[in-house]
Amino acid sequence: MRRTVNAALLALPALLPPLWGASAQAPGRNTLVVMREIDADNYDPPRSTARGAGEVAYMLSDTLVSLDWDQKTVRPGLAESWTVSEDGKLYTFKLRRGVTFCDGKPFTARDVAYTVTRWADPATRSPVRWRAGPVKEVRAVDDHTVEYELNEPYGELLYQLTLFFGSMVDQATVEKLGQNHGVQGFNGTGPYCWASWTPRQELVMTRHPNYNWGPPIYQNPSPQVERIVWRVVPEANTRLAGLQTGQGDVTQYIPYFALPQLRAVPSVKLSKQENYFWDHFMGFKVDKPVVNDPAVRRAVNLAVNRAAIAQAAFFGAATPADAYLNPNVAGFDPEAAKMVPSFNPDEARKVLDEAGWKPGPDGVRVKDGQRASFVVYAISTQIARVQSEAIQADLRRVGVEMRIQLWDATVAWGKLATQEFDAFFMSYPYISATDAFALYFDSRNRPTPNRMNWVDPETDRLLAEAKTALDPAVRERAIAGAQRRVSEANVWLPLAREQLWVASGPRVEGVRAHGIYGIGLYKGLDIRLTR
Amino acid sequence: MSATVPDDSAAPPIIETAAPAPPVRAGLWRRLLRDPGTALAVLAALLLVGAALLAPLLAPTDPYDNDLARALQPPGSPGLPLGADSQGRDLITRLLYGLRTSLSMGLAAVLLGGGIGAAVGFAAAYWPRVDGLLMRLMDVMLSFPAILFGLALAAIFGPGVRAVVLALSVATVPLMARIVRGSALVVMRQDYIEAARAMGMSDARLILRHLAPNCLSSIFVFATLRFGQVILLGSALSFLGLGAQPPEAELGAMASEGRNFLFFAPHIAIIPSVLIFAVVLAFNILGDGLRDALDPRLRI
């Protein structure tokens, strides 16, 4: 009964008049409207780290290699096949024939060389330049053969090349548009072509007529829809209503609290990706008072009820994180996962007692005149608010005070780059264990993203080995070692692993949640409209 | 908190020194309660302030102790007459503590902003040479919306009650300055001021002995009205996430939190909003009633 009432309530806004002004009319035949929460800053692949940029980039262009639904297996993309030299420094890609850009120009190895060279060029100021690896030179051997030469081996290269940052760009368009590349226009090899962009409103793309070189993970090598409109609908409830009124067809930006009710709506289809690597954690600055004590960090890990938090903050639509990484990710080490303490408040109290933190007059523990109190910073979101308050209450029960400071997104990133706080909340996407750990635990990545100030020569050595060793078994061992060092020291409090859900409306078929870099639709080749 | 509630103990000093008007001490309370609306507002204000003061005694549970298993329970659930919030905390407890925060924020802002504003107003009225300068300054301050100012302060100091109180105070200063200057200018023209001057009374003494007491009724009325407005504004700032930080309860922040669950647990947004509405309405009616009661022209 209650479910029905809730479903009816959910449908209520559907009866209200449309809220989107001029663009409110229902989408036309063969036009797919994708609703999302925010726009990207630009659509030049190497120059934006926004998920919103990637959503569009995957459709506007292609990468050399693609990633399967399991998020582990690298599949052909623009490259049909590839070989790696014995020393791991030379990758040779054989390109697919018959590929063209949206403007009809044939795609050749020279375009690959230009794209990667531009990505790795410091002048491009790409925030993700490191992802291209230690590039020595990328050269076109002939029209369909590319040599990707590195200064040292980089085991992560193929994974990194599946990411949209390496999406093919057209030199002539880049040179013509300059700083406005990906703002005023874009010429790619993707299943869809750039039509127009109205920032913070919508981006329109049309079908690329020649396209038949989609990754083998799709049933269709070509796009099925004539036109895609990426519409920004910031308000969650409006997106939910839009899905049911037909003003929008697909969205992955579903508020978690709405999921159970959305499942009860028969016209809405939900696709879930099990292998989704977007995790929430709290990191400690290991050199700040109170949290520099490993006992405190261990006690915090013991005291927090992750299962209850996953329920309260994500309404059950997230998995409590009992390890630093998702068990399905490449390079995950089960031994390291066992080192992460599970919920046991009594044990937490014992750990604190033994470390000399004695209960103080106000219930907060004290050691050598120092109160067991620390400040945590987070971006002010609903999830951060619920999560932080729940953790605060859990910690109070064992005599640790956590002071919460939530910052508006406009100032949060600047604040999170300072040394003012003792702990912080963050969530991030990753593609492999090495990808995640090299990003956060390399001592060279201070002050961000290594906001923990984790400086451990052994971790650095293991990370370097995980990236550069030639033998996959050695790489595997190295990244497992890094996970153990960090898990043992309780540098983080792992919290939750998000699940990816993509909801689609009644006239849409073939939506399957992918989840690379947090992106739901990826190339979306199997999506079609029934009316 | 009692300063905002007119009762017999607070009334006498105001009235006895109100030299140009006949003594109203005995009549104020009676006149205030004569109007049923105002009487109701007085009662409501007393109840709200009392509830806020006694929150630690009245609250059925610990305001910070959560129970995630009870999160978002609707009103009427066992042991939760008004339901629970997203942390599973009893909403009654949170409301009581939220009321406490909201009222304290309002009081602090009115005292701080009103105090500074009144000083500026007296100075402007008493020394015509600085009048223009001070009042233009107030005009400049008036031109900044309080919300914008709150956002800027929160960006600098970090969000929190301090930033909100500061923003609300700054928004109150120019308004109070204008009100005080206006009534002080009227008083300045009175013969007894002339007489006091002729007696060689010092500036400070004259302002404190004669000028200020005779402006008190308008200050008092404005402060009461402003109290209601400031609470509303403070709730708005908290709603935007600038005010009380977790786990502190604050009515605006509670409403903001509940907004996310409007479809499924509407009580979390609606109940604090209704309470904000009740507080603001009570103090507005009270302010109106006070003005009527203190206005000699309306006296029969």
Image (spheres, coloured by chain):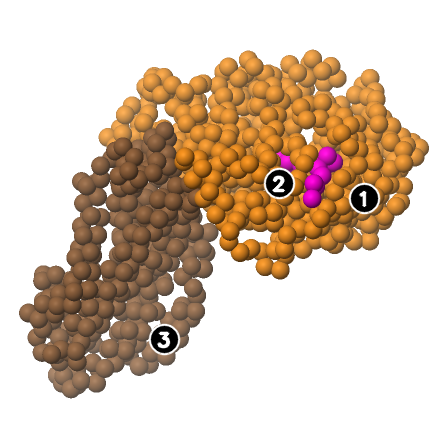
Chain colours: A orange, B brown
Q: In the depicted view, which residue is nearer to us: B206 or A484?
A: A484
- The residue sitting at 90% across, 33% down in the picture is A97
Q: Nearer the viewer, mark 2 or mark 1?
A: 2
Q: Secondary structure at mark 1?
A: loop
Distance in Å between CA atoms under marks 3 and 2: 63 Å
Distance in Å between CA atoms under marks 1 and 3: 66 Å
- The residue sitting at 9% across, 73% down in the picture is B24
Q: Is residue A56 above or below residue B172?
A: above
Residue placed under numbered mark 2 in the picture: A506
Q: Chain of mark 2?
A: A
Asked if the residue at tag 2 contacts the one at tag 3, i.e. Cβ–Cβ closer than 8 Å, the answer is no
Sequence order check: which comes first, mark 2 or mark 1?
Answer: 1
Q: In the depicted view, which residue is nearer to us: B178 or A450?
A: B178
Main SS of the magenta segment?
A: loop
Residue placed under numbered mark 3 in the picture: B135
- The residue sitting at 73% across, 53% down in the picture is A196
